[in-house]
Image: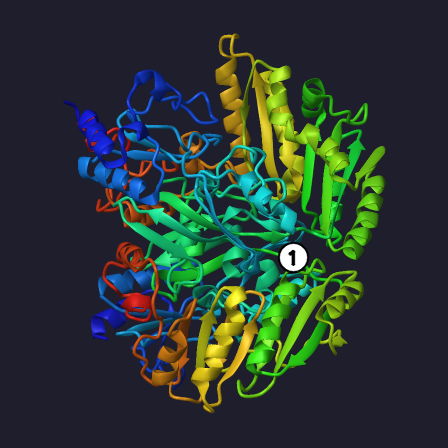
């Protein structure tokens, strides 16, 4: 019997037959996350219902020396939940209870499989919501949000998952159930854990902060004849001391795609649209609205639309929120990037992307969180055309290089996962990465928790620092795959 | 410190001086004081320290050097006062990159000239960026803007072995790699030396109003306090801070809420209506606003906001007539406490049945059995310490669990 078969038997005894999947056909369901071009059929899938069951699975993995990967809804865009063929995939979809809503303390305690939007839905009637709002919020799980430190359109004003989590219950890679609480004295392990992409353990319970709904929300759509003019408007708005809840921008190609997909009805002839959302006390928003309108007009907006109620607001957002899926209408295949640049570098970087696009004959649609410089270039290609995928990949990589050159980051909210680990060395030195590895070794000395993600070629824990050359000896000896 | 270690320190070219009484770290006189002027110089000092097994304590303005347990040993005090450069202020990006020794006041002045601020109220005059981060101190507006860890977007540190490491960057939105900034924020110098930090900034508010009222410090008054605190925190007029000042827990207390923005007059009126009792509305902060409640003796109480009222009542009961004062963020449930009473009785009495944590930051030399109190993940914290500082040379023994 192989190690995995033995382990699967052990897991059936520990958490029940119905919670352990080894049937090859059913395993295939879990072979990828939202980044579908990386695929691996997991060795075993488990569907635990409690933290104790997760701990039992992790302890068993530790005993057998088998790697494990946690997965929420599988909507991640960087392959962070890509399974291991030689490992166990821990799927949290059965852990979806909202355990407590505590409005006096403005918090809720939830299990990791609860969807992001379900939290808001549970408290909306009482005038609260959960602020981070990734585009996939209807389906993505809060456990996945914690792993990826997910953002969303409104994180310009409200911050990311890490700013909205007060405590976590985790199962450590050694199989212990531990609470990380922001109120506890000591190191901010909570802050280090959020965004660690499943490499430091598995989240089993999350205490999220709830935010009071703003008194009013106003959404503006401004159409421009050129993307540069839109960029100027963004800079002017921020320069005027206004912090909108969101500032989003789409270019002509992205508008074309959204129009084809959902008929969003954006102004005809728009080469760029800007969506600005203002929220807060009525008196404050009224003032800001006047300012933003003036700035957009002065920057050359040829049409302005305003939404004050949820239906109108949804109409404005429809195009933006559908943009990723919509490019499927105008291109057989595409790569989504997630680079970030300082806001003031946006014009140069957009010009650079345009140049790359023309040089390589690869179309790029731009959809981005303009307020915080987070770009989502959609690199379009025809996967039936020989060499097109490679060219798209090349353009994609060059875009990340552009972001790094301008002092930015390779990922703003999608995470590094398997997809961008090879770019980490362009952004960080070996010393930086080795130091991050110290954190990894403190939590997971054997490297069993989601190995092969984030870090390109991490050292083994306990290995003496030095110059790394060539293939790791364990890899060369066929004893390990991914060090 | 032996001569070879001293020689090696001198050979780094960094200014080294003898220590005086002002350099004492919680009563421990350092062997020497070093005054590095760059991250590279800090690294050189740390390499020498590693080679010669020197215990190191980093210090900025020295305003909190007496916090925590005394270090088990202190051979070298690394004074970051000469790391005093604002490296880059990208005003258009609302980002600033500074060296650790820049004082928070100097930084605030520089940013205010451009209409911006780091929205982190610092209670201690002369505190530096590095010291503020290392102790994770924050002030009233934590309710709206969070604390240092929420505003920090990039950090440079020097580890115990002299390795220079960076994480984050100079963009607000960035999830590449582990966030070492969060790990080092509030680590009390036990993991390494913070030498540089990058923060996200906010535009300076056009206007501010403080709405202030008083309540009796009785059980009934504390119940009213809890109700009003809850209403204010949920108010759609969005106060940036809701602060309590209770100079003697046997007497009355004062609450002040801050609203910031262009329309803050309207919003202050809304806050006043919500409070529904006599309020003073002013464009000036109350004198106590954002000031530490004590320096010699200072404790920090952290409770869920809805447990503030009953926790404060427990403080009052434990205090007797021992001159206990409380001040802090009512909306967030984080309070400073100063006391003239004996801490060995007061601290366990408050911790008894507390839904939260009580930490003794400074005890004016009075030995306290367990200043940091309980914490949840001490095994993992020890493991982190072991990886970053295996020889226990960074502020040994100062922090939680004897880390």
Task: Report the coloring of the rendering.
Answer: rainbow
Q: Residue furthest left?
A: A1
Q: In the rendered image, is residue B25 in sight?
A: no
Q: Which quadrant of the view contains residue A248?
A: top right
Give how far across and how far down residue A274 sits, in percent: 73, 36
* Residue drawn at the location 54% of the way across and 49% of the way down: B170
A463 lies left or right of A400: left
Query: In the rendered structure, the residue with mark 1 lies on which chain?
Result: B
Mark 1 burial class by Cα count in 10 Å: few <14, some 14-19, many 20+: many
Question: In the rendered image, which quarter contains the C terminus of chain B?
Answer: bottom left
The percent coordinates of residue A30 (x first, y second) are 39, 24
Q: Residue at x 57, y 39 (%)?
A: A117
Query: In this figure, which residue is indicated by the disc labeled 1?
Result: B202
Residue B348 left/right relative to B327? left
User: Does residue A447 appear left or right of residue A347 in this picture?
Assistant: left
Asked whether B279 or A195 is in front, the reply is B279
Can residue B381 be seen here? The reply is yes
The N terminus of chain B: image quadrant? bottom left
Image coordinates for residue A204, horizontal then vertical, percent: 38, 44
Q: Which residue extends farthest front? A: B220
Please tell me whether residue A164 is drawn above or below residue B294 in the rendered image: above
In this view, the residue in front, A194 or B180, is: A194
Q: Secondary structure at mark 1?
A: strand
As drawn, A232 above or below B143: above
Residue located at (59% from left, 32% from top): A376
Considering depth in this image, is A262 or B276 the residue closer to the camera?
B276
Instruction: Give the farthest residue toward the bottom.
Output: B321
């Amino acid at each position: 019997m192989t190690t995995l078969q033995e382990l699967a038997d052990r897991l059936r005894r520990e958490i029940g037959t119905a919670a352990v999947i080894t049937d090859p056909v059913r395993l295939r369901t879990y072979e990828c996350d939202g980044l579908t071009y990386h695929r691996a059929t997991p060795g075993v899938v488990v569907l635990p219902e409690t933290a104790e069951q997760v701990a039992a699975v992790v302890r068993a993995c530790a005993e057998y020396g088998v790697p494990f990967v946690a997965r929420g809804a599988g909507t991640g865009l960087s392959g962070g939940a890509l399974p291991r063929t030689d490992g166990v995939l821990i799927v949290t979809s059965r852990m979806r209870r909202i355990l407590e809503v505590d409005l006096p303390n403005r918090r809720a305690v939830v299990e990791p499989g609860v969807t992001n939007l379900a939290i808001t839905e549970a408290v909306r009637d009482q005038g609260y919501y959960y602020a981070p709002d990734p585009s996939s919020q209807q389906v993505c799980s809060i456990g996945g949000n914690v792993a990826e430190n997910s953002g969303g359109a409104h994180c310009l004003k409200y911050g990311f998952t890490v700013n909205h989590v007060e405590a976590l219950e985790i199962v450590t890679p050694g199989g212990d159930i531990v609470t990380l609480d922001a109120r506890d004295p000591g190191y901010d392990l909570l802050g280090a854990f959020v965004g660690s992409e499943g490499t430091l353990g598995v989240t089993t319970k999350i205490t999220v902060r709830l935010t009071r709904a703003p008194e009013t929300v106003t959404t503006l759509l401004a159409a421009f004849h050129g993307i540069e003019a839109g960029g100027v408007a963004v800079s002017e708005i921020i320069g005027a001391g206004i912090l909108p809840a969101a500032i989003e921008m789409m270019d002509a190609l992205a508008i074309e795609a959204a129009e084809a997909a959902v008929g969003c009805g954006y102004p005809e002839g728009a080469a760029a649209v800007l969506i600005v959302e203002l929220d807060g006390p009525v008196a404050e928003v009224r003032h800001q609205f006047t300012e933003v309108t003036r700035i957009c007009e002065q920057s050359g907006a040829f049409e302005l639309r305003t939404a004050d109620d949820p239906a109108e607001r949804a109409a404005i957002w429809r195009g933006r929120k559908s943009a990723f899926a919509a490019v499927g209408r105008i291109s057989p295949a595409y790569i989504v990037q997630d680079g970030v640049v300082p806001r003031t570098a946006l014009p140069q970087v957009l010009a650079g992307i345009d140049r790359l696009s023309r040089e390589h004959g690869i179309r790029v649609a731009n959809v981005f969180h303009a307020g915080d410089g987070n770009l989502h270039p959609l690199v379009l290609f025809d996967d039936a055309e020989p060499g097109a995928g490679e060219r798209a990949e090349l353009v994609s990589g060059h875009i990340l290089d552009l972001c790094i050159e301008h002092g930015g980051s390779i990922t703003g909210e999608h995470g590094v996962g398997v997809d961008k680990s090879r770019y980490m060395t362009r952004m960080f030195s070996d010393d930086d990465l080795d130091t991050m590895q110290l954190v990894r070794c403190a939590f997971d000395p054997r490297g069993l928790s989601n190995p092969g993600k984030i870090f390109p070629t991490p050292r083994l824990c306990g290995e003496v620092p030095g110059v790394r050359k060539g293939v790791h000896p364990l890899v060369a000896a066929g004893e390990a795959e991914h060090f | 410190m032996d001569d070879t270690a001293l020689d090696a320190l001198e050979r780094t070219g960094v200014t080294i001086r003898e220590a005086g009484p002002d350099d004492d770290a919680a009563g421990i006189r350092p062997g020497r004081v070093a005054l590095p002027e760059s991250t590279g110089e800090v690294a050189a000092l740390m390499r020498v320290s590693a080679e010669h097994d020197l215990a190191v304590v980093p210090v900025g303005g020295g305003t909190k050097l007496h916090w925590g347990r005394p270090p088990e040993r202190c051979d070298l005090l690394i004074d970051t006062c000469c790391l005093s450069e604002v490296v880059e202020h990208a005003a258009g990006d609302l980002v600033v990159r500074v060296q650790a020794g820049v004082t928070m006041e100097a930084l605030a002045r520089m940013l205010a000239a451009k209409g911006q601020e780091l929205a982190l109220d610092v209670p201690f005059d002369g505190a530096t960026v590095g010291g503020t981060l290392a102790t994770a101190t924050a002030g009233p507006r934590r309710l709206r803007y969070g604390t240092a860890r929420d505003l920090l977007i990039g950090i440079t540190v020097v580890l115990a072995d002299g390795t220079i490491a960076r994480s984050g960057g100079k963009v607000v939105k960035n999830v590449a790699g582990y966030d070492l900034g969060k790990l080092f924020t509030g680590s009390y110098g036990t993991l390494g030396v913070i030498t540089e930090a990058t923060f996200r900034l906010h535009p300076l508010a056009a206007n501010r109003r403080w709405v202030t009222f008083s309540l009796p410090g009785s059980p009934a008054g504390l119940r009213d306090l809890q109700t009003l605190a809850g209403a204010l925190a949920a108010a759609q007029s969005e106060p940036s801070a809701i602060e309590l000042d209770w100079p003697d827990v046997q007497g009355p207390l004062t609450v002040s809420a801050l609203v910031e923005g262009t329309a803050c007059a309207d919003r202050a009126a809304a806050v006043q209506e919500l409070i529904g009792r006599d309020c003073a509305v002013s464009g000036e902060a109350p004198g106590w606003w954002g000031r530490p409640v004590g320096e010699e003796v200072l404790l920090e109480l952290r409770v869920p906001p809805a447990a503030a009222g009953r926790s404060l009542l427990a403080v009052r009961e434990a205090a007797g007539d021992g001159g206990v004062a409380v001040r802090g963020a009512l909306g967030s449930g984080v309070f400073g406490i100063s006391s003239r009473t004996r801490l060995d009785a007061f601290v366990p009495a408050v911790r008894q049945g507390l839904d939260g944590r009580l930490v003794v930051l400074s005890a004016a030399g009075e030995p306290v059995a367990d200043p940091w109190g309980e914490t949840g993940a001490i095994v993992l914290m020890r493991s982190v310490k072991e990886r970053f500082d295996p020889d226990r040379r960074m502020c040994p023994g100062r922090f939680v669990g004897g880390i």
